[in-house]
Image (cartoon, rainbow, N blue to C red):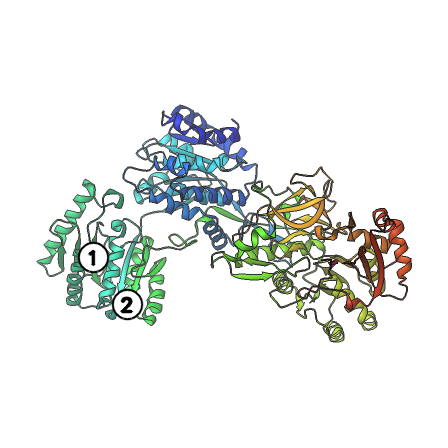
Amino acid sequence: MTVTKTMTATADAYEQHGDGGAHHYWQGAFIGDEEAGRRLAALPAAVEAALATVLETETVLAACDALATALGDPAHPVHTRLAAHLPPGEDPAVLAELGGLLGRRELTRKLRRELGSATPGRLNRADPRETVYEAWAPVGLVAHIAPGNAATVAPLSIVEGLLAGNVNILKTSSADTLFTQHLMAELAALDPTGALAARVVVLRFPSSRQEWLRLMCAPADTVAVWGGEGAVEGVAAHVPAGCRLVEWGHRISFAYLTADAWSDAGTLDALADDVCLHEQQACSSPQVVYLDTEDEKEVFAFAERFASVLAARPPAAGAASAGEPDPAEAAELTTTELMARLEEHLGLTRVFAAPDGSWRVMADSRSPLTASPLHRSVWVKPLPRERLIATLRPMRRYLQTAGLAGSRSDIAELSRTTLAAGVTRVTPVGAMLESYAGEPHDGVYALQRYSRRVAVQADPGRFATTACLDDLVRPVVLPPPTGPLLGKEDVQEPARELARADAELYFRSGGSTGAPALSVFSYDDYDTQMHAAARGLLAAGYDPVGGRTANLFYCGGMYGSFISFFSVLERLGGVQLPLSAGPDHRATAQALIEHRADTLFGMPSYLWQLLHAEADALRAYGGLRKVFYGGEHFTEEQQRTLKVRFGIEVIRSITYGSTDLGPLGYQCADSSGGVHHLHADLHTMEIVDLAEDRPVAPGETGRLVFTTHARRGQHLGRYLIGDLGREVPGRCPCGRQAPRFELMGRTGDVMRVATYFLNHRRFLALAEERGGHRGELQIRLDGTEARERLTVRVEQAPATDPERLREVFLSGYPELRSAVSERLLDLVVEAVDGASLDRSPTSGKLLAVVDARR
């Protein structure tokens, strides 16, 4: 069976197959009992085949996010198809609720909270200063035994298994609809890789079919069971030795009120909300109300007051709210109430109940925890706080939520006490059924129960620059980018309109190629990107153990470089001197010498000025060893000069990136010039033609287009960054399999002058290679009455000869020579002080081209 083909056909086949006996969904196909039986017998082999390929977390997130969007739109075909498979009486609004849980934001928060990262499966360094790599690995096969009373539990359980990278096989009740099967089929259909379909099997059969249950559990690495003790015991018999059994069983919750709280009418209304919502069917619904007292009269009086509050509540809204108990539940309600009424004659209890049996409050003078028959049935009991642990701890296996009401100091004290008694959740009264993204369930994180923490220790000498072992094994495969190409103007306005929750950190670009642009990040996005940049720095040769780094990037004005690399060094644990770029070169040099800095971070133009302004002092110090630069480029001649004059051994790009996209590429020890590896776990890259929106041929130069995947703060898909580049073929000698590309300049560096296209980089190359120029170079364009004027402004040096450079440009640049000879262009070369060159006021970047034409 080809998973991808079967998966693709699934969504189109819904209307055709109906049920048709195909009650099971197996790796992309709907099948019947006979075929399911055959495949169950071969389940171990199917699991091994699926686990042979890696499931990228982004694949799960992208498909779930697309499904969430569909579930939130009642007019969407996916919503319509799935609504038809909901249990009878189930409100279709549950689909929107489910979609809210499957969105990228919620699942990313869940991953970060439970597994510490949005990409927990990658073998990254646990500590950047050690070559020890850790990750969360899938357990392998997770067998889920779903409950029959909650339509959304089964699919969410599978999604948790997928987020952990597992193969998942799930059993639904024979009385259930095919909702879970069809939901999983829709999810798989949104994944073009077929990886999700390969990891999902959903079977529908009765628990009496023990052979199928045995075949499900036999090869499992974890078995997750939803249900009571009977359900757990029935499954546990089939769980093999060494297999992890995860019990999501029934739990008991209670409310605890202090004297001040129980006399407050608002507390009673909030408590009634918790009781009536879902008719006490949730594990977090209160079954018992404890009062902080020993006085039974206070208990009976409170019960009577609370009964009047319940009496004023409208009746349950039908089956969808579990309002009608089944015959067995009705019998338990009657028995419990009658027993409590009998004990009234002993002075132990008082019962207050609706004439129609729709609610009942049973006051009991005894403290031990008693389960409620539910359906608005509440016990009220005394329990002084000093006896709370002794009374509740014997039931600790069954405790879940404690809803507390009292003063601030009471809440703080009682939270600790109830947790010590065995409770796993504490909430305010009135919020017992509320939850938050990534909340632990029954005292544990589900994703950790479905994962293993694994570690690899590597030789420090051989892996000193390897930040992630996976980079040496395989390229990251992310969902292919879709949609139109976007420019800065297409993302600026949406950035200003982002939800406040996603716009937590604001940066502005340096404005070196136009007006500064606004970029926004969530803190989670920022953290992800800083960790990626840190891994790139390790690859480039940064030493977090022995290095002493001066951060000399520009700071202020919402410019992000200094702050970002402060964060990068913090994550690397490197020694940092946060000096920033400043005009007092002498003070900066003295700080470098005094604090024994050996590594410099900064903009090439600023570092060039600093080193030459304080050349004598810094050469005498002789301690500078590494330079990591960003925002601009050091030419080969400039690098050679720094190595010869200052003894600097390593000069590499600190990162290739932008304010809006973050880090895009990094250099390794085998990269030079503009060659970078792509941060392939964050972005996909395309290279499109200079004039047309089509891919270039392999190796050709084109416009770089990036799509960011690990981002919720701002959507940036198929974004034209304004840079030119070409693909570098073949595998890098460093062993990393991330794609490589070479930067070929900015689109703004290509000037249309006097009917010709001229490139700033060509001028710079000619000045260095033929003219012996070692400094900075800037081009200014002006319009005159007769013709256009191109002025090449070069940094003054003792050997600078403007006329010689003019001859070099004319002889080495045929298009320039033609424009001048045809009297379409005046060419001027000026030698100027480096400080007089035009720079961005925000970032300090040299403006390569200043176009003053009007």
Secondary element type, mark 1: strand
Q: Which kind of residue does numbered mark 1 sit on?
A: Trp
In the rendering, at what x and y percent does residue 844 appear?
Answer: 70, 65
In which quarter of the view is residue 846 placed? Answer: bottom right
Residue lying at the far front of the rendered structure: 785
Q: Which of the two residues, 117 or 209, is positioned nearer the viewer here?
A: 117
Mark 1 lies on residue? 379
In the rendering, at what x and y percent does residue 562 appear?
Answer: 64, 65
Residue drawn at point x = 65 percent, y = 38 percent: 694
In the rendering, at what x and y percent does residue 395 appear?
Answer: 30, 55
In the picture, the quarter occupied by the C terminus is bottom right
Q: CA distance from mark 2 to mark 1?
A: 18 Å
The residue mark sitting in front, 2 or 1, is 1
- Asked if residue 643 is positioned above or below residue 715 in the image, the reply reads below
Q: Is residue 610 visible?
A: yes
- Asked if residue 90 is positioned above or below residue 833 in the image, the reply reads above
In the rendering, at what x and y percent does residue 700 appear?
Answer: 74, 40
Q: Is residue 683 left or right of residue 213?
A: right
Q: Is residue 771 visible?
A: no
Mark 1 residue crowding within 10 angstroms, few (<14) / some (14–19) / many (20+): many
Q: Are marks 2 and 1 in contact (CB under 8 Å)?
A: no
Q: Which kind of residue does numbered mark 2 sit on?
A: Arg
Q: Earlier in the sequence, mark 2 or mark 1?
A: 1
Mark 2 lies on residue? 385
Secondary element type, mark 2: helix
